[in-house]
């Protein structure tokens, strides 16, 4: 289980969220500070001219950009249910009359850090665009993703309350383990999509009070990556009278419950980046582990204790929870691919670092070749080698909030990975969306490219939804399985072609298979990507798409500071927008 761009639970740290978020969002240090590790990274591939994105140092201006609050309906279909306050941030220092308004949608994260990064950082792509187009920049926080004041509440509540947010500090109701399921019902993709158009109708700035900044007289442009890229594309498609254009990066519009193709892309990237032997070793390791897990209780307990240590409950961990813990070794790939860190710290738990460890002979300390014939080593030996990798258990303890092998003598001894429910409000909210709307379950990719255990099944991931929201299915608040097929039917999925929309995906982005730029559908639904600018307000046919696959890159690479291929991708959108804006007509925009 992703999201964007990816993604832990407090007691289910890895279960729902690292199962979901690790594989569902553009999960970097700006997202959830206590979630699965994805710190700042940089690096260069070992192959010729294969550069991967790096997070450049960003100088943040000292100019304060305060959060502002928009009053929005809790339920757009029933205004009588009341309103809540949603956060957003604005930079209008470059605005000149006639310039567009650019909305950078943060998606499934607290938006505060992103707001200061994109509206204040010297290396921000958004600042570049604002200056070029003399526009206004807005960073938008998604509903339901820390404390918030609700101004109008349900009749049963008779006083103002500070409540925990859905995603950040923009929440209609308190979100915790006692939240009634009906209070999560307004958390749907449709309700969240309706928020910005509602807000845009009355948007104004005191410093430009003589100018109509609403979509009636000013072109609005939606930008996002991962889940927010999905929102950008849907915003243009469903609200064309609000959004004149959209930039959809790594947008998983082809929602699926069984998302096994995620790991196919990881395997493909490892091979193409020069780590083919390591991918084969990892395949052998996981195949061996699956045999042990299926060979009786004693054998299953022994393999778990090999990795987690004896006693302390390790043997009680379910096969699925144990398999998920081992799958964490791939979390860094989504953002950094096979790039290495320059220092030991966070980079020591990256996938290429693990590969170097697996392929280094412990006696001679000589690395094995990364390509060509791999040395013949028994799966048992490789498995024991993985289990001895020091960062692995530290990572498991952090993400599952356990203390396996008593690595921290200041904490109680515990090593049962089969914990209960996540209590973090943001994690609860995001889990609700995944369990109700899309799934995106990061399921075992069967076959010669499998990298994770077969116990990471669709049934296991569904059990995490049931564990997190006990009784919600029985009461009808959650479906038996996520409504991914319904979402695709309603939106068009990968076949959607809203006009004035630019699509991107990284060549090895694990989420590429759910974007219109997928490799997976070429046989049944071939769509040719082109950077030839389409005419304004003209929808492209199903066989053609205005988009670009960014070479040697992963998730949301086009918004990574200092990454030249990403900058090139953005330039296609900039040139297209210049062309499309020539067609913009106030009060008669977006007829298609």
Image (cartoon, grey):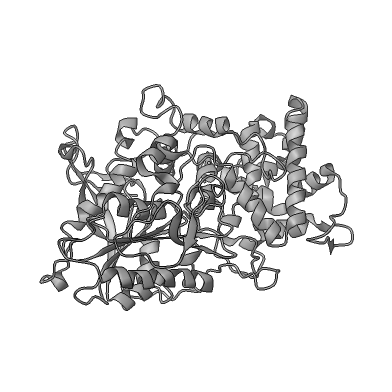
In the image, residue 587 lies at what x, y percent? 14, 61
- Residue at the location (62% across, 47% down)? 263
Q: Quadrant of residue 214?
A: bottom left
Q: Residue at x 31, y 49 (%)?
A: 147
**Could you say where residue 314 lies in the image, as x and y percent from the top left?**
68, 35
Task: Say left or right for 567 vs 239.
Answer: right
Q: Is residue 239 left or right of residue 35?
A: left
| 365 to 63, vertically: above or below | above
**Is residue 191 among the parts visible in the rendering?**
yes
What residue sits 76% from the left and 33% below the top?
291
Residue name at image x 56 percent, y 67 percent: 53
Outermost residue, left direction?
210
Q: Provide residue 422's location: percent of width, then percent of height.
A: 47, 39
39 and 448: which is toward the camera: 448
In the rendered view, would you say 334 is above or below 62? above
The spot of residue 480 in percent (x, y) is 44, 27
Residue 310 shows in the view = no
Classify residue 552 by image quadrant. bottom right
Tally the marks.
0
Residue 103 figure quarter = bottom left
- Please state, as top left, top right, bottom left or bottom right, where the C terminus lies in the image: bottom left
């Amino acid at each position: 289980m992703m999201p964007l761009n990816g993604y832990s639970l407090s007691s289910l740290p890895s279960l729902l969220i690292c199962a979901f978020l690790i594989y569902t969002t553009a999960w970097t240090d700006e997202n959830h500070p206590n979630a699965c590790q994805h710190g700042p990274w940089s690096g260069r591939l070992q192959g010729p001219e294969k550069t991967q994105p790096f997070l450049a140092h960003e100088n943040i201006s000292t100019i304060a950009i305060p959060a502002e609050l928009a009053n929005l309906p809790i339920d757009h279909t029933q205004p009588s249910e009341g309103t809540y306050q949603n956060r957003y941030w604005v930079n209008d220092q470059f605005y000149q009359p006639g310039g567009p308004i650019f909305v950078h949608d943060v998606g499934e994260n607290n938006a505060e850090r992103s707001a200061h990064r994109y509206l204040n950082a010297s290396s921000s792509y958004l600042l570049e665009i604002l200056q070029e187009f003399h526009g206004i920049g807005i960073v938008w926080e998604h509903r339901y993703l820390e404390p918030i004041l609700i101004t109008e509440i349900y009749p049963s509540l008779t006083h103002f309350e500070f409540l925990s947010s859905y995603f950040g500090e923009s929440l209609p109701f308190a979100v915790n383990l006692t939240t009634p399921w009906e209070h999560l019902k307004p958390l749907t993709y449709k309700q969240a999509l309706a928020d910005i158009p509602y807000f845009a109708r009355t948007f104004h700035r005191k410093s430009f009070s003589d100018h109509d900044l609403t979509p009636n007289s000013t072109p609005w442009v939606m930008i996002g990556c991962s889940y927010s890229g999905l929102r950008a594309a849907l915003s243009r498609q469903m609200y064309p009278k609000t959004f004149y254009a959209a930039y959809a990066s790594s947008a998983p519009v082809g929602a699926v419950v069984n998302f096994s193709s995620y790991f196919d892309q990881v395997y493909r990237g490892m091979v193409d980046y020069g780590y083919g032997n390591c991918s084969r070793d990892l395949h052998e390791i996981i195949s061996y582990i699956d045999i042990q897990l299926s060979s009786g209780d004693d054998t299953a307990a022994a393999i778990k204790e090999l990795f987690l240590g004896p006693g302390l409950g390790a043997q009680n961990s379910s096969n699925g929870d144990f398999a998920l813990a081992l799958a964490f070794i791939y979390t860094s790939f989504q953002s950094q691919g096979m790039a290495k860190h320059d220092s030991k710290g966070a980079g020591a738990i990256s996938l290429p670092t693990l590969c170097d460890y697996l392929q280094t002979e412990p006696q001679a300390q000589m690395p094995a070749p990364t390509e060509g014939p791999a040395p013949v080593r028994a799966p048992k030996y490789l498995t024991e080698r993985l289990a001895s990798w020091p960062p692995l258990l530290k990572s498991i303890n952090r993400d599952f909030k356990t203390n396996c092998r008593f690595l921290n003598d200041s904490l109680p001894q515990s090593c049962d990975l089969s914990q209960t429910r996540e209590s973090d409000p943001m994690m609860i909210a995001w889990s609700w969306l995944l369990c109700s709307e899309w799934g995106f379950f990061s399921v075992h990719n069967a076959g010669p490219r499998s990298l994770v255990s077969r116990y990471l099944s669709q049934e296991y991931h569904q059990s995490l939804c049931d564990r997190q929201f006990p009784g919600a299915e029985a009461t009808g608040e959650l479906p038996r399985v996520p409504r991914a097929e319904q979402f695709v039917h309603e939106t068009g999925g990968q076949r959607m072609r809203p006009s004035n929309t630019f699509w991107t995906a990284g060549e090895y982005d694990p989420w590429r298979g759910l974007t219109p730029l997928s490799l997976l559908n070429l046989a049944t639904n071939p769509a040719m990507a082109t950077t030839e600018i389409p005419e304004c307000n003209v929808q492209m046919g199903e066989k053609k798409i205005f988009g670009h696959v960014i070479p040697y890159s992963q998730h949301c690479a086009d918004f990574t500071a200092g990454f030249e291929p990403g900058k090139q991708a953005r330039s296609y959108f900039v040139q297209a927008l210049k062309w499309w804006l020539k067609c913009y007509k106030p009060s008669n925009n977006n007829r298609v």
